[in-house]
Amino acid sequence: MRPNTFKRKLAAGETTVGAWLSIPSGYAAEIVASQGVDAAVVDLQHGMIGLDTALAMLQAVSATNATPLARSGGIDDAQIMRLLDSGAYGVVCPMISTPQDAAEFVAACRYPPVGRRSYGPARGLLYGGPDYVSRANGEIMAVAMIETRAGVDNVQQIAAVEGVDALFIGPNDLALDLGSEPVPESRDPVVVDAIRRIREAGAEAGIPVGIFASTPEAAAARAREGFLWVVPDNDAGLLAKATARGVAAVREA
């Protein structure tokens, strides 16, 4: 099976840069994934993306050196299995708040006897290789998003669930659930402390922790804090900011 290079980099303690894809376009996905990122996540939770478009985007990412991942809308067995069958090498699942949530999510990502993923690898077999089914459980990533107060309170137990390969922080939803403003780089002490607790829980469990940032500078700061997977905004945000800078430069001239 084609190795999951992103998973290997994280396991080796390397700091990685991820892309977050919300624009429903295979062409846009290929452009972003070609810029040297380690992984690219096709977002089916908040992005304007359906399963047909997600397939084209995963194919586009697969033409680059980035590892193709996808974010599901939740613990939805059917959607998770279709994303994996489409060639995603990992699923990021939002709103994991309890160890039971984590165990259910992991089971949806794994073939029996350790999980309940149904057989039908389709494009996963084409991209992964002829031994995909026998090796998928070891290569496919199950990434649990921690973005609620309950998730923070249970983060050590979540991190200890067998098969959870990484934690990922959704800072906006986390801030909202903690009663604060949805700001990725919030300075609210409650939010700052929650993010620290999640990062430390991952370190204690020996699994990497990722986080979304609103700017490349903020992502670099997160990397210095010890996050092994940083995302410097999503494709739409980066496009908007780059366009705004271009317009401003012309106006000023």
Image (spheres, rainbow, N blue to C red):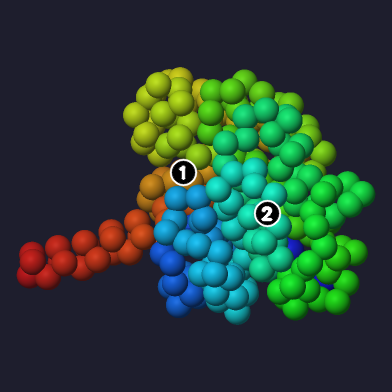
x and y percent of residue 151 in the render? 60, 28
The residue closer to the viewer here, 168 or 129, is: 129
Which quadrant would the N terminus be assigned to in this image? bottom right
Residue 78: mark: 2
x and y percent of residue 74 in the render? 59, 44
| Kind of residue at disc 2 | Ala
Residue 8: mark: none
Say if residue 222 shows up in the picture: yes
| Kind of residue at disc 1 | Ala
Is residue 89 positioned above or below 145 on the image?
below
Say if residue 205 shows up in the picture: no
Looking at the image, tell me whether mark 1 or mark 2 is earlier in sequence order: 2
Residue shown at the point (43%, 29%) measured from the top left: 175
Query: Crowding at label 1, few (<14), some or many (≥20) Cα neighbours within 10 Å?
Result: some
Residue shown at the point (55%, 48%) measured from the top left: 73
x and y percent of residue 162 in the render? 82, 39
Left or right: where 223 falls relative to 246 = right
Number of marks in picture: 2
Left or right: where 205 falls relative to 225 = right
Give the label, 1 or 2, closer to the camera: 2
Q: CA distance from mark 1 to mark 2?
A: 37 Å
Is residue 142 positioned above or below 134 on the image?
above
Which quarter of the figure has residue 39? Answer: bottom right
Secondary structure under the numbered disc 1 in the rendered image: helix
**Residue carrying label 1:** 221
* Callout 1 touching callout 2 (CB < 8 Å): no
Residue shown at the point (67%, 28%) measured from the top left: 98
Residue shown at the point (47%, 61%) measured from the top left: 49
The residue closer to the viewer here, 213 or 163, is: 163
The residue closer to the viewer here, 116 or 251, is: 116
